[in-house]
Amino acid sequence: MRTDRASGGHAVTTQGRRGGAARRRASCGLRHVTAALCLVCTLALPAPASAQEVGVAARVNGAEITVFRLERHFEDYLRLKARNVAAIRSPDVFKRLKREALDQLIDKELLWQESQRRGVKVDDAAVEEMRSGIESGFATREAYERRVRDAGFDEASYAEYLRRELAASRTLQALAGTPRISDEDVRRTLEQEPAPAGMPEAEAQRQVRAYLAASRRAEAGREALQRLRESARVEVLQPF
């Protein structure tokens, strides 16, 4: 169940073509989840909070998503969509994009909570692999460590943050499952959308199978997240 609160405190409860085109369609599947499930908070670690970034944007079963966290994630979300915040002239578009970013954080929190319920464990080796991958994007280790400190993390708290991200990602994968793609599924798809001229049959079948698997995982993930939302109490405290 979701509770959206507008300013004033009132609450309302609501409960291919193959190749490039096919891959684009498949990638849309869990865009609102995986883009931020953006495990690697990429290289854009949070910056210190300003006065406008204090407060709570939402609560998920009582767990708070802070305004500070939303603002940092919103920056990453716009970067992934190749949008410049200064170029967004429409207040409605700005609000819609920010709400989409908040929805991603809500999904991540739901997945983290579900991972705890399922007892998902992430070992130190997996955390270190992820951390070292992020560090490799910086020119020097000193630059990486300075950015982590500026974000308000120490070594232990940053490792714990990454552990949560990995747990959420693994939970989503478990919820989505591994779809079974039959030879008949592949054949029917190729009948509807023939492979480009000259493409070997085996390669065409491989691409179609991969596309169908990604599409079905995406759909299963969306359905699983919807079930989690329906059974949760989500309070949105920011006006949109």
Image (cartoon, rainbow, N blue to C red):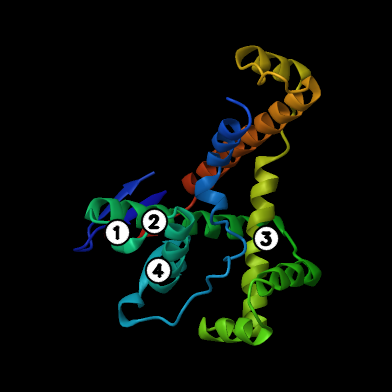
Q: Which is in the foreground here, disc 4 or disc 3?
A: 4
Q: Residues within 10 Å of mark 1 (few under 14, many from 20)?
A: few
Is residue 109 visible in the rendered structure shown here?
yes
Q: Which residue is mark 3?
A: 167
CA distance separating discs 2 and 3: 29 Å
- Earlier sequence position, callout 1 versus callout 4: 4
Label 3 SS: helix
Give the image location of residue 30, x and y in percent. Answer: 55, 44
* Nearest the eye: 142 or 67: 142
Amino acid beneath label 4: Glu
Q: Residues within 10 Å of mark 4 (few under 14, many from 20)?
A: many
The residue at the point 73 percent across, 24 percent down is 204
Is residue 16 visible in the rendered structure shown here?
no
Please give the label number shown on residue 71.
4
CA distance separating discs 1 and 2: 8 Å
Amino acid beneath label 2: Arg
Q: Which is in the foreground here, disc 1 or disc 4?
A: 1
The residue at the point 36 percent across, 53 percent down is 97
CA distance separating discs 4 and 3: 23 Å
Q: Which residue is mark 2?
A: 83
Label 4 SS: helix
Q: Which residue is mark 1?
A: 87
